[in-house]
């Protein structure tokens, strides 16, 4: 089975508003992110944080690649969860956006965290969520979930009937084809530079090539790789320091192997993208 740690329904759904009346106002130095680069949702948030230049405004507490709480959560996050919900018994999972003023969790909803970072902390006009294209950003996020991530998982799922695997592969190829067509006359999906749409797709492509590929046949990987604009786009974004600096290939591999119950297929032989040439040195990944 090609699996990473499962994503639970977010337990906390607080939102950062535009003024003090919202309860959680967009005040510099008030909030903290808790992320593990091996997690696709955390990777998206980390890249967005870097694109917005928030190192001094909203610090990140980096977590190990593998949850260490014994229940799929992190021991370091347990006090936050317990302070935020009396008697909390679920896993203390990442990502987390916390409020240093109250010592409680604001949100564990990665989609909402991404949106609030782009809406409330865009101090330099990075415009990662163009107002005119808000619906397009949501459509791309849906494409990633239903047209890339889910079918890639099913296409390599052990014990699945060949016809079902082929159907999932066709869905995956349809998703990649939609992106390939979109990139025919542009370098990014929605604007002249990176937006949340690009962040969403890039993290899915990283996961596809570093995790799901291991469980695909060589022929399936050839069909996945036969989208030259998509994979050149992935390389181009990886060269951007806000993207490539957050690649933790060893962590992704450890996270995958810790929970994967499937068998390698012939597609494991060679990655589509040489991600290692864009990743930070291993010693620097923790910072």
Image (tube, rainbow, N blue to C red):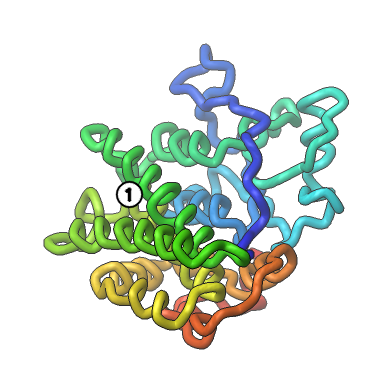
Q: Position of residue 185 (x, y in %)?
A: 12, 61
Along the line of sight, the residue nearer the viewer: 178 or 18: 178
Label 1: which secondary element: loop
Quadrant showing the C terminus: bottom right
Residue 91 in view in this figure: yes
Q: Position of residue 169 (x, y in %)?
A: 40, 63
Residue 274 in view in this figure: no
Quadrant showing the N terminus: bottom right
Along the line of sight, the residue nearer the viewer: 126 or 168: 168
What residue is pinned by disc 1? Answer: 195
Is 129 left or right of 207, judged from the image as shown?
A: left
Residue that sits furthest to the top in the current view: 21
Q: Position of residue 31 (x, y in %)?
A: 62, 36
Q: Quadrant of residue 64?
A: bottom right
Is 195 left or right of 244, judged from the image as shown?
A: left
Q: Residue at x 45, y 48 (%)?
A: 145
Looking at the image, residue 57 lies above or below residue 103:
below
Looking at the image, residue 49 lies above or below residue 218:
above
Residue that sits furthest to the left in the current view: 185
Is 176 left or right of 185, judged from the image as shown?
A: right
Q: Residue at x 30, y 58 (%)?
A: 174
Along the line of sight, the residue nearer the viewer: 136 or 160: 160
Q: Position of residue 16 (x, y in %)?
A: 52, 27
Looking at the image, residue 259 lies above or below residue 98:
below
């Amino acid at each position: 089975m090609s699996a990473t740690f499962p994503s639970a329904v977010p337990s906390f759904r607080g939102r950062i508003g535009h003024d003090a009346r919202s309860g959680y106002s967009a005040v510099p130095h008030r909030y903290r992110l808790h992320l593990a680069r091996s997690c696709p949702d955390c990777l998206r948030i980390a890249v967005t944080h870097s694109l917005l230049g928030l190192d001094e405004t909203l610090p990140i507490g980096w977590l190990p690649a593998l949850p260490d709480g014994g229940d799929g959560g992190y021991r370091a996050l347990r006090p936050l969860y317990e302070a935020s919900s009396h008697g909390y018994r679920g896993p203390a999972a990442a990502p987390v956006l916390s409020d240093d003023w109250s010592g409680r969790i604001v949100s564990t909803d990665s989609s909402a965290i991404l949106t609030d970072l782009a809406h409330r902390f865009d101090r330099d006009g990075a415009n990662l969520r163009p107002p005119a294209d808000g619906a397009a950003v949501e459509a791309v996020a849906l494409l990633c979930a239903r047209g890339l991530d889910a079918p890639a998982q099913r296409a390599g799922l052990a014990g699945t009937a060949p016809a079902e695997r082929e159907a999932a592969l066709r869905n995956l190829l349809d998703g990649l084809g939609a992106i390939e067509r979109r990139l025919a006359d542009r370098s990014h999906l929605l604007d002249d530079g990176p937006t949340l749409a690009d962040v969403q797709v890039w993290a899915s492509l990283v996961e596809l090539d570093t995790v799901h590929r291991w469980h695909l046949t060589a022929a399936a990987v050839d069909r996945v790789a036969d989208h030259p604009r998509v994979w050149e786009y992935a390389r181009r974004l990886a060269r951007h320091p806000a993207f490539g600096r957050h690649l933790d290939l060893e962590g992704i591999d450890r996270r995958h192997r810790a929970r994967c119950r499937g068998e390698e297929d012939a597609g494991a032989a060679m990655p589509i993208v040489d991600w290692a040439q864009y990743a930070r040195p291993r010693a620097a990944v923790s910072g």
